[in-house]
Amino acid sequence: MFTRTPLLALAVLAMAALACSFNIDLPSIRGGTVDTGPTQTEPIQIPAQDSSPAMLKLQFGAGELMLSPGASTGLVEGTATYNVEQLKPTITQTASGVTLSSGPMNTDSIPFNIGSDMKNTWDLKLGDQPIDLSIAAGAYHAEMDLGGLSITSLTVQDGASDVHLGFGQPNQVAMERFSYSTGASNVDLSGLANANFKTLIFNGGAGDYSLDFSGQLQSDEDVTIKAGLGQVTLIIPDGVPVVFDVRGGVTNLDMQGSFQGGGRQFNQASPGPSLTIHVEMGAGNLVVRNP
């Protein structure tokens, strides 16, 4: 069940951040509210691509996004349910890949009102073809289970978001790079050891961010985390080798668990593949703990 209230307070900050990074516009508004109409549900079908990996872009303005494995055929299958005509989804195929977007949208002014009358929900399943996946979103709630897929690269950019993204099962191929950039948001990343990435770069603004490295670590992984304000929580299972350092003006550093070291450099010694984590924060709280 999604909670809408926090996003209403964060939306204006997020739109300013989005304008500096990528272009996702919201529907035209009159008097500060979105014009709604009858609720429509459309099937989404994107066939398997000739290229490997398939280049898939999801451009989602505002609403609720659900992603999971399990497409029986093709690259993507699912539904889009909406009651704002400008949010009608479109599929664009080019030589460089395929893009699923929330239709042609125009922003006349901000702030806007994402109230209970507006509906825009994508419920999508992804296939087992290797995928280079890119997600760009605005003010949205998301539940994304990407475990068991074959993701070669993952890029997420969002604004005022409330997101849980997890890898409940190991990624079936090596992920070259996982990049996540967000603004004033709540972001929960779980099962990150299962993502099988080489490099993870997380950039946050002012929010509450949790990165859980549970799962099966298959190779050495390098992680860089940058955040402006708020709280960052790192969850590292006992027995996972890790070396990390902390930089910047962290207001409070709370170390919990079996970590050794002092000052701003710590480690957890154990045999096997290891994590190297660099954290840079402007101000806020950093919590590092075992599950």
Image (tube, rainbow, N blue to C red):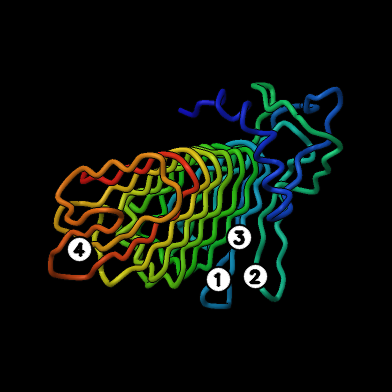
Disc 3 from disc 2: Cα separation: 11 Å
Figure disc tally: 4
| Residue type for callout 2 | Gly
| Residue type for callout 4 | Pro
Q: Mark 1 and mark 2 in contact? Answer it, CB < 8 Å.
A: yes
Give x and y (percent) for residue 239. 14, 57
Q: Mark 4 and mark 1 in contact? Answer it, CB < 8 Å.
A: no
| Residue type for callout 3 | Ile
Disc 1 from disc 3: Cα separation: 11 Å
Q: Is residue 14 above or below residue 38?
A: below
Residue shown at 17% from the left, 55% from the top: 260
Q: Earlier in the sequence, mark 1 or mark 3?
A: 3
Res 154 label: none
Query: Secondary structure beneath disc 3?
Result: strand
Badge 3: how crowded within 10 Å, few (<14), some, or many (20+)? some
Residue shown at 17% from the left, 70% from the top: 272
Name the residue beneath numbered marker 1. 54
Q: Quadrant of the C terminus?
A: top left
Horizontally, is 163 left or right of 95 in the view?
left
Name the residue beneath numbered marker 3. 46
Q: Earlier in the sequence, mark 3 or mark 2?
A: 3
Q: Nearer the viewer, mark 4 or mark 3?
A: 4
Disc 4 from disc 1: Cα separation: 33 Å
Q: Nearer the viewer, residue 239 or 263?
A: 263
Q: Nearer the viewer, mark 4 or mark 1?
A: 4
Q: Earlier in the sequence, mark 2 or mark 4?
A: 2
| Residue type for callout 1 | Ala
Q: Quadrant of the N terminus?
A: top left
Q: Nearer the viewer, mark 3 or mark 2?
A: 2
